Image (spheres, helix red, strand yellow):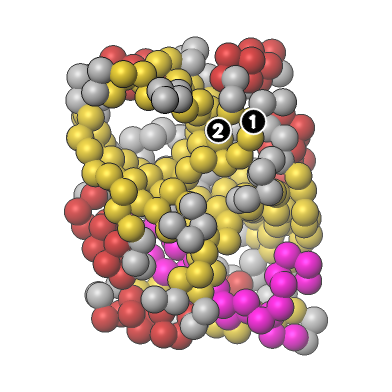
Amino acid sequence: MTIKACHHHGFTVTDIDRSLRFYRDALGLEVERISERNNLPSYDTILGYTDVQLKVAILSRSASGFVLELFQYINPPAVRRELQNYYVGSSHVALQVDDIDAQYEILRSHGFGAISPPVDVVRDGRRVARAMYALDPDGISVEMFQEFADIVKE
Amino acid sequence: MAICRVHHHTLTVSDMDRSLHFYRDLLGFTVIYDKVRENLASYDEVMNLKDVKVRVALLNDPAAATIVALLQFHNPAPRKREMSNLFVGSTALAVQTDDIDADYQRLKAAGVRFTSKPVEVVRDGRVAARLAYGFDPDEIVIELYQPIDVS
């Protein structure tokens, strides 16, 4: 087996500049690189489209080495459709925060919101976390949670 | 700023057992949690759905550095629809390999579909990486990625 690790997680978005107001300005992720990619035959082959033109933003959270890649398709044009978490293939990233209520206020001050305000997650009578699903400008869920017990072991 | 770290990436799948075969047996992830959750008022509220019942599996990547969460909804009933990278909100999970040709051949022999063979990505006149886009059992894009060391 030669697969070593997850390297990054990509999302297709409508408008990188608009998405950066969420991921960079409201969430505080660092922008590593923004590039436009045109005339790259390799991309046409890999993605299976003709004359791919992309705008790509690579974001990181240096403390965890995490890389998020945002793809804005210029050609072929991106297609918007309804997003629901129970649709197969839907995806979200979950961020652990140390004060979810403060994070919710930061989001709101930047004009963003969540499916619901932060909610206590109670299992077997114990509060194990407090969580919300924030929504990026395209309606992609970004889960945020504040952990009170190890949710993997609980 | 209060964001500590990325905790996990979630993918909604239609058949957990089939997906576990893919992520655990073919990609080499390790299952660290596998439970059905229901009657959790917080889930209904956080997701804005009613009577959520989900099977959740958490998997560590081979480096034990990233957790991938697989969600199989029992209620509401999962909905399948056409998948394409052009759809806003679609996702690609990139896994790093040190021998993309071997992994490509191995996964292909196991029935995994790919858009193309591994392809060199040339940026600024040099080969930066080799990539291939494969698909998990639900057609979620799994990108095989081998960085090319130019030092």
Where does residue B83 sit, x and y in percent of width and height?
45, 35
10 Å crowding of disc 1: few (<14), some (14-19), many (20+): many
In-image side of B114 versus A69 (left or right): right
- On screen, B98 above or below A141? above
Label 2 residue SS: strand
In the rendered image, which residue does mark 2 sit on? B96
Q: Quadrant of residue A54?
A: top left
Quadrant containing the C terminus of chain A is bottom right
Where does residue A20 sit, x and y in percent of width and height?
26, 58
Report if the CB atoms under discs 1 and 2 are less than 8 Å apart: yes
- On screen, B96 above or below B48? above
In-image side of B20 versus A107 (left or right): right
In-image side of B138 versus B90 (left or right): right
In the rendered image, which residue does mark 1 sit on? A3
Q: Amino acid at mark 2?
A: Gln
Front residue (pair B123, A75)? B123
10 Å crowding of disc 2: few (<14), some (14-19), many (20+): many
